[in-house]
Image (tube, rainbow, N blue to C red):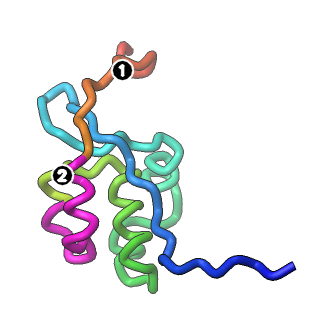
Amino acid sequence: MKMPTIRRKATNPMQPLVTDPSGTIRFKPNKIVQYLLDRGPFDMNHLAIQDFSDDDRSQFAQLIGYSRSGFSELSYVGDRIWEKVCELPVHAKRREATDAV
């Protein structure tokens, strides 16, 4: 059976936008990704010199909870991605069990 041809390049999904307690609109961070960045052997400087695609870099910035305004200034965020971000609704951040501590 012949596999269908993918005509469009697949892109990573977009993280939802939330408003943090200080009122900044940012991407909803992924706690596992934050943990790995904070506790792992690599930091942002190390990651910056690796050969990752702009799409992967863009998604990583979202997963670590980059602010929407800061995201717009990243060199690897193109117009098409920024247009998608501008269309995303902003959700109120829910208090999580770890936020209450």
Which part of the image, by quadrant, shows the N terminus?
bottom right
Queried whether the magenta region covers residue 33, the answer comes back as no
Bounds of the magenta span?
72-87
Residue at which label 1 appears: 99
Marks 2/1: CA distance? 27 Å
Nearer the observer: mark 2 or 1; the answer is 2
Residue at x 34% of width, y 66% of height: 58
Residue at which label 2 appears: 86
Residue at x 18% of width, y 52% of height: 86
Queried whether the magenta region covers residue 74, the answer comes back as yes
Q: Which x, y percent locates residue 4?
A: 69, 77
Q: Which x, y percent locates residue 30?
A: 45, 43
Badge 2 density bin: few <14, some 14–19, many ≥20, Cα 10 Å: few
Badge 1 density bin: few <14, some 14–19, many ≥20, Cα 10 Å: few
Q: Which x, y percent locates residue 21?
A: 19, 25
Could you tell whether 16 is left or right of 85 in the image?
A: right
Could you tell whether 61 is left or right of 32 in the image?
A: left
Residue extending farthest to the right is: 1
Residue at x 33% of width, y 59% of height: 61
| SS at circle 2 | helix
Q: Compare marks 2 and 1 and give the one earlier in the sequence.
A: 2
